[in-house]
Image (cartoon, coloured by chain):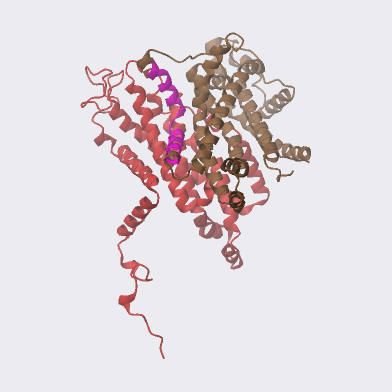
Chain colours: A brown, B red
């Protein structure tokens, strides 16, 4: 059943992915200031504009370029950077794991903070603890990540003459330094997601805790821990998982600024640099990978529903 | 025998039909605001912050003691004092004046984006929900594709196409929020379109345009207003992020996000107030809009809770 459901979902996802690919392909080609002109001036790849356009395959009609591009993607070829002439897939192979690690760590931190605080906040509704955690969540939603990141780098340096580890070290070179470098950026990246999840966990749990079956559980004399975690949380977690799926897209978007500030050579920074340099094969390649990852994440989230709630059958 | 009519003095003037017309509308507003503040104190605080922000933006010339790019002789990187409340920056400019003028950019970008984005979202959402069929399917597939991008990625890509500048920031942000907003408006339209009064209007021979403008749009307005208010905070954050990365309003005009980036970053170790105040301003503004939006949502459209 699950397999058939997935096949159906994939079929529905295909037109959306095709439209997304069209957006991915068209957007960078609308860049102002012809990239070819820029390249000719800065790098002198060819003797004139026409030759360079022909070399880059830009002289053919747009729809021909699009279908050629789709064909190459089907074969796993994302094209090559206009500036460095290196294959985009090769660059992504190095950079994607960094962004995935950062995003995953941020999501894990977000969940670790959000769910327990949300549960405590709901079970201790209208107490000081509830007010404090709700206020922190509201602040977490309002404070921009790039500001926290700036403060985290600047203030300790002024107060204690200590700067958090920035830059990037391979795990194989120094595991401790690697983790130290990822810790702060991941926590900062997870703040907004954590705040959103905490508020949702609290709201959903409060709704579930008012249900009749919870009253029955209390009447049976079950312990609070069992009632809240087994009967309450499990029934309120589905919307939280859905929002977590949506939030992952925002985490990926957030990596652009965080990688820029902390000097990570990840996919987010790659995209940022490509946008600044109008390197459209890179912009297309990264955007396509991002959209595909998000579609896969959402499918996985869907599959998770059935695991969490046995009443859901596909 | 005629039924006895209750004496006027026994009637409660608060509830009697016919009397409120005499009341001054200004007082009604005041009452509504007071009632809202009692029910939603955090929302009222948010409202007060938003009001302060609007005043700062509208009267920046009168509130700010200096011009936003005026260099003050002998006042380079001075800490906060009675002369310069928030200190001065590396180019000897008054930080308080720059923060006040910065409100103008944030408020302009936020409101212009929301008006434009909400207008598009309403047009697309209402038409898609009302007409249904192939048009709806086609529009929804495009919306699906659009919202499967992380919004900051698509925002940067659009900004790269349009180039920096306030108008382009507004356009890029409006394009991004249109897709997600239209989905919510479509949902509201689907539920409103099922009402008997829409069917009655159709039976009476009303055309599509009349039904849309007289019956559907007024009834999805609560959702639209809530959507717009909640979106304002996010737009200010996104504008800050764009300016931080150098895609916002070009210098010397002060945008809060840009004040946290660029050449100023190297001086922040010696003048930390340069790193603090613009961030406080963004956070307060977003906090204000979020609180107000949350409270308005609870009052106007509780169905959107959790969205």
Q: Is residue B253 visible?
A: no
**For residue A307, side relative to residue B243 (left or right):** right
Q: Quadrant of residue B141?
A: top right
Residue closest to the far top: A173
**For residue B50, side relative to residue B93 (left or right):** right
Q: Is residue A152 magenta?
A: yes
Magenta stretch?
A: A130-156
Residue closest to the far front: A221
Which residue is depicted at the point 53% across and 39% down?
A119
Q: Quadrant of residue A227?
A: top right
Which residue is depicted at the point 63% across and 12% down?
A85
Q: Nearer the viewer, residue A237 or B297?
A: A237
Point out the image quarter for the N terminus of chain B. Answer: bottom left
**For residue A302, side relative to residue A192 (left or right):** right
Q: Is residue A158 magenta?
A: no
Where residue A81 appears, x then y in whole percent?
A: 61, 16
So how many labels did they put on this image?
0
């Amino acid at each position: 059943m699950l397999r058939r459901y997935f096949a159906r979902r994939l079929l529905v996802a295909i037109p959306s992915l095709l439209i997304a690919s069209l957006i991915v392909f068209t957007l960078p080609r609308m860049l102002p200031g012809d990239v070819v002109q820029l390249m000719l001036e800065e790098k002198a790849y060819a003797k004139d504009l026409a030759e360079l356009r022909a070399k880059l395959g830009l002289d053919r009609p747009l729809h021909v370029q699009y279908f050629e591009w789709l064909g190459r993607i089907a074969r796993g070829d994302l094209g090559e950077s206009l500036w460095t002439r290196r294959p985009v897939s090769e660059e992504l192979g190095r950079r994607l794991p960094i962004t995935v690690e950062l995003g995953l760590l941020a999501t894990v931190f977000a969940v670790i903070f959000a769910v327990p605080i949300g549960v405590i906040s709901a079970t201790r509704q209208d107490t000081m603890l509830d007010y404090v955690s709700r206020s922190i969540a509201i602040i977490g939603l309002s404070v921009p990540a790039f500001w926290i990141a700036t403060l985290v780098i600047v203030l300790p340096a002024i107060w204690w003459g200590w700067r958090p580890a920035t830059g990037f070290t391979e795990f194989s070179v120094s595991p401790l330094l690697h983790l130290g470098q990822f810790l702060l950026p991941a926590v900062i990246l997870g703040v907004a997601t954590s705040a959103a999840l905490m508020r949702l966990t609290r709201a959903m749990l409060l709704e579930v805790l008012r249900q009749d079956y919870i009253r029955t559980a209390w009447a049976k004399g079950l312990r609070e821990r069992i009632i809240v975690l087994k009967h309450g949380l499990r029934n309120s977690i589905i919307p939280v998982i859905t929002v977590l799926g949506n939030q992952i897209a925002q985490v990926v978007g957030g990596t652009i600024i965080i990688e820029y500030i902390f000097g990570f050579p990840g996919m987010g920074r790659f995209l940022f640099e490509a946008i600044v340099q109008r390197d459209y094969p890179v912009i297309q390649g990264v955007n396509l990978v991002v959209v595909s990852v998000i579609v896969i994440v959402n499918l996985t989230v869907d599959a998770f529903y059935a695991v969490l709630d046995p009443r859901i059958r596909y | 025998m005629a039924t006895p009519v209750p004496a006027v003095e026994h009637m409660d003037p608060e509830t009697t039909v016919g009397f409120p017309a005499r009341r001054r509308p200004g007082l009604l507003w005041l009452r509504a605001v007071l009632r809202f503040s009692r029910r939603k104190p955090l929302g009222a605080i948010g409202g007060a912050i938003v009001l302060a922000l609007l005043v700062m933006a509208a009267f920046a010339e009168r509130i700010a003691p200096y011009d936003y790019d005026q260099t003050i002789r002998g006042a380079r990187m001075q800490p906060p004092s009675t002369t310069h409340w928030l200190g001065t920056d590396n180019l000897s400019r008054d930080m308080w004046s720059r923060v006040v003028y910065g409100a103008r950019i944030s408020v302009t970008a936020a409101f212009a984006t929301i008006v434009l984005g909400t207008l598009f979202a309403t047009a697309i959402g209402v038409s898609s929900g009302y007409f249904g069929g192939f048009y709806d399917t086609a529009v929804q597939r495009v919306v699906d594709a659009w919202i499967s991008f992380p919004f900051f990625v698509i925002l940067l890509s659009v900004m790269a196409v349009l180039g920096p500048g306030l108008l382009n920031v507004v356009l890029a942000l409006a394009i991004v929020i249109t897709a997600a907003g239209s989905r919510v408006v479509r949902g509201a339209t689907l539920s409103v379109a099922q009402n008997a009064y829409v069917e009655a209007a159709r039976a009476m021979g009303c055309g599509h345009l009349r039904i849309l403008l007289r019956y559907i749009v007024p009834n999805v307005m609560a959702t639209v207003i809530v959507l717009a208010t909640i979106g304002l905070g996010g737009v200010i954050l996104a504008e800050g992020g764009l300016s931080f990365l150098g895609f916002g309003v070009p210098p010397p005009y002060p945008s809060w996000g840009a004040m946290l980036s660029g050449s100023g970053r190297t001086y922040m170790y010696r003048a930390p107030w340069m790193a603090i105040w613009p961030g406080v301003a963004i956070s307060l503004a977003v906090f204000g809009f979020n609180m107000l939006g949350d409270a308005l949502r609870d009052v106007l459209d509780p169905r959107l809770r959790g969205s």
